[in-house]
Amino acid sequence: MCPPTHFEVTYSINPWMDPTKPVDLPLALAQWEDLRDRYRSLGHSVELLDPQPGLPDMVFAANGATVVDGRVLGARFAHPERTDEAAAHRDWFRRNGYADLWEPEHVNEGEGDFAVTASWILAGRGFRSSPLSHDEAQEYFGRPVIGLELVDPRYYHLDTALCVLDDARDEIMYYPGAFSPGSRAVLARLFPDALLATERDAAAKTMSGRPGCGSSSSTEWPSER
């Protein structure tokens, strides 16, 4: 996790961002600390990434890399405002003993667009990550990668529209309207028992694309970058 010490909205790279609306930084810090403490109270270890001035979106730490079996595929961001985040994440992994780290050639936004299940790596494309990054991930991790086309700009990252509930049993939850017809058919074939979100649920952001969302009850789906 990365604390929102330097969090602000000074640019817009998705439909949810509005630079004209002020940020309540003390509230953001309090909410972040509450989430961190809840994870710890449930027995999870929380590693912290130092925030950097001028990189407000580092708080969305899942976007900085994808980790599978201890191997790290770094991120390459689509927007220049986020470019320098990738190096900050790579430095953290190196300092913390991750020797097997790959700097990608193609644009991918980490676990914002890669979701690991028991059988596959699901990979989003259409708004941020390049389809070429899917091949790169498959070659690096040696796991089958399933490309999924995102078609609604409100759901520009895979993790804004899909959540892995149990990565040991191929259980997921997703909003069908975020995906192309072909991708919906693939998801229905691979995950016939998936939980499906309604348009109202998805628009209200009442699901969670974060660890700990393994419950059928609705919880807040936090704003993404």
Image (cartoon, rainbow, N blue to C red):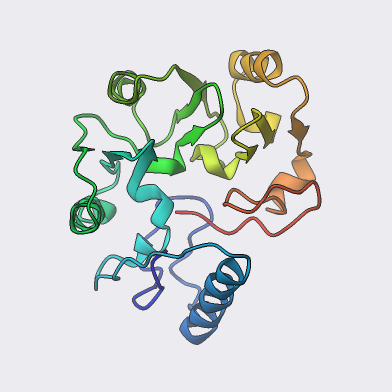
- Measuring from the top left, give residue 155's x and y in whole percent: 56, 41
Write down the quadrant of residue 41 in the picture.
bottom right
**Residue projecting furthest to the bottom:** 26
The quarter in which the C terminus is drawn is bottom left
Q: Is residue 187 left or right of residue 125?
A: right
Q: Is residue 196 left or right of residue 58?
A: right
Depth check, front residue: 80 or 5: 5
Depth check, front residue: 53 or 68: 68
Write down the quadrant of residue 107 in the picture.
top left
**Vertical comparison of 32 with 155: above or below:** below
Q: Is residue 49 visible?
A: yes
Write down the quadrant of residue 31 in the picture.
bottom right
Q: Is residue 49 left or right of residue 210?
A: left
Depth check, front residue: 190 or 55: 190
Tell me the residue at 25%/53% (across/down): 93
**Vertical comparison of 177 with 190: above or below:** below
Q: Is residue 154 visible?
A: no
Number of dots carrying numbers: 0
The quarter in which the N terminus is drawn is bottom left
Q: Is residue 103 left or right of residue 148?
A: left
Depth check, front residue: 70 or 152: 70
Tell me the residue at 58%/65% (across/down): 43
- Measuring from the top left, give residue 146's x and y in whole percent: 49, 19
Tell me the residue at 59%/35% (across/down): 167
**Vertical comparison of 49 with 196: above or below:** below
- Measuring from the top left, give residue 5's x and y in whole percent: 37, 78
